[in-house]
């Protein structure tokens, strides 16, 4: 399983003058530090606050301690997620732009739930592409869980309804609904999302209970812009950040809290089945500073 330290190597590579072990940020020109933080997509506002704080801080205080403290504070409390223990299926919908990692994340989550003795169902509602649903069907076979999917061209809302119905009939604990990738700017496709929510809610009051957006970390700040638009169409209750391992712009995670205020629940640190881990602000900041060697 990939770890935080290796996942953040690209971002660390940019900011190594600031964070890496042995880096002497006390000698770093403050403007240079500002530029480095901005390049790794630390939001401008937070960067300004950091610079102000460092400029006015007492010389006796280590800049590194100040910086890590401010970064941790900006990320807020870690939000832990546990599968709700209800008598009816808990329905979770995953959405996001094309290729962000939704299908892989749905499978990784189903595997986690299955491993905890729960009975998950995967719903393949990606009916845009011929392979959209079958990719998830293969995953369900690998995990060993129930699956309901739709053929290409089928109505995604109908597929989601059928999945919730089947999950109720089969006494599943969890339904994870994978949706087709869509650009936040394409109105007709975005309109399909509330329609899917209404369809599920018709079959099961309160469904979907959670809506998580899957964000590709390599997009940096753009991912936050996309999330804002999705959030206007369907209110998001959680964020999964994938591909942190390939990103040099991990600083955008700070914007997720400050600009979106939706908790980051899980992070993808690699392509492997088990490379989805709960988001830990402490491990994230430690890995930026190069102190999380495993
Ligand atoms: N390195 C890395 N790759 C990932 C991670 N999560 C997903 N991927 C890869 O990203 C690619 C796209 O993943 P999918 O799960 O198919 O993405 P999707 O959002 O379902 O894509 P569409 O359905 O086409 O919109 C695949 O090659 C995955 O293996 C991650 O955390 N790290
Ligand atoms: Mg997919």
Image (spheres, helix red, strand yellow):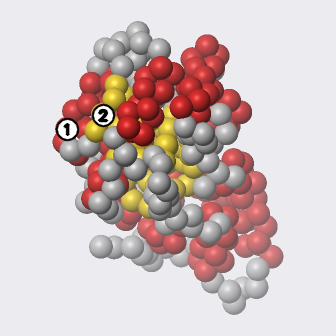
- Crowd tier of the residue under label 2, counting other residues whose Cα lies within 10 Å: few below 14, some 14–19, many 20 or above: many
Instruction: Please indicate, yes or no, whether residue 15 appears anywhere in the rendered image.
Output: yes
Sooner in the amino-acid sequence: mark 1 or mark 2: 1
Binning the other alpha carbons within 10 Å of mark 1 as few (below 14), some (14 to 19) or many (20 upward) gives few
Q: Quadrant of the N terminus?
A: bottom left
Q: Which mark is residue 141?
A: 1
Picture residue at 31% right of the left edge, 62% below the top: 116
Q: For the residue with label 2, is its CB less than 8 Å from the closest atom of ligand 2? A: no
Which residue lies at the image location 49% right of the left edge and 43% below the top edge? Answer: 91
Q: Position of residue 216 (x, y in %)?
A: 47, 40
Q: Residue at x 68, y 86 (%)?
A: 61
Between residues 236 and 30, which one lies in front from this camera angle? 236
Residue occupied by mark 2: 147
Above or below 91: residue 116: below
SS at badge 2: strand
Location of residue 108 with respect to 103 vertically, above or below: below
Q: How far is mark 1 from mark 2, CA to CA?
A: 8 Å
Position of the C terminus by quadrant: bottom left
Q: Quadrant of residue 276?
A: bottom left
Residue 106 percent location from the top left of the image: 38, 41
Q: Is residue 129 visible?
A: no
Which quarter of the picture shows residue 62? bottom right
> Residue drawn 76% across and 59% down?
48
Eye-nearest disc, 1 or 2: 2
- Please report contact status of discs 1 and 2: CB closer than 8 Å, yes or no: yes
> Looking at the image, which is closer to me, 64 or 210?
210
The single residue placed furthest to the front in the displayed view is 169
């Amino acid at each position: 399983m990939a770890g935080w330290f290796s996942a953040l190597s690209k971002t660390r590579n940019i900011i190594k003058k600031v964070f890496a072990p042995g880096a002497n940020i006390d000698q770093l020109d403050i403007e240079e530090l500002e530029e480095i933080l901005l390049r790794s997509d630390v939001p401008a506002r937070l960067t300004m606050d950091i610079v102000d704080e460092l400029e006015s801080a007492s010389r006796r205080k280590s800049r590194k301690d100040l910086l890590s403290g401010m970064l941790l504070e900006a990320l807020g409390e870690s939000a832990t997620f546990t599968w709700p223990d209800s008598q009816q299926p808990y329905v979770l919908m995953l959405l996001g732009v094309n290729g962000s990692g939704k299908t892989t994340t749905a499978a990784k989550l189903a595997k986690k739930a299955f491993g905890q003795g729960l009975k998950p169902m995967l719903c393949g509602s990606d009916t845009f592409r011929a392979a959209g649903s079958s990719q998830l069907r293969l995953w369900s076979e690998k995990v060993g869980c129930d699956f309901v999917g739709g053929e290409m061209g089928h109505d995604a809302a109908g597929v989601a309804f059928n999945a919730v119905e089947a999950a109720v009939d089969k006494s599943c604990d969890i339904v994870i609904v994978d949706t087709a990738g869509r650009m936040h700017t394409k109105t007709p496709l975005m309109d399909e999302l509330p329609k899917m929510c209404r369809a599920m809610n018709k079959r099961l009051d309160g469904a979907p209970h959670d809506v998580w957006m899957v964000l590709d970390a390599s997009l940096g700040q753009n991912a936050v812009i996309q999330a804002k638009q999705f959030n206007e169409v369907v209110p998001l209750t959680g964020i999964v950040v994938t591909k942190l391992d390939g990103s040099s712009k991990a600083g955008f995670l700070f914007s997720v809290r400050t600009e979106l205020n939706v908790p980051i629940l899980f992070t993808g640190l690699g392509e492997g089945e088990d490379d989805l881990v709960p988001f830990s602000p402490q491990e994230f900041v430690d890995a930026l500073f190069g102190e999380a060697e495993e």
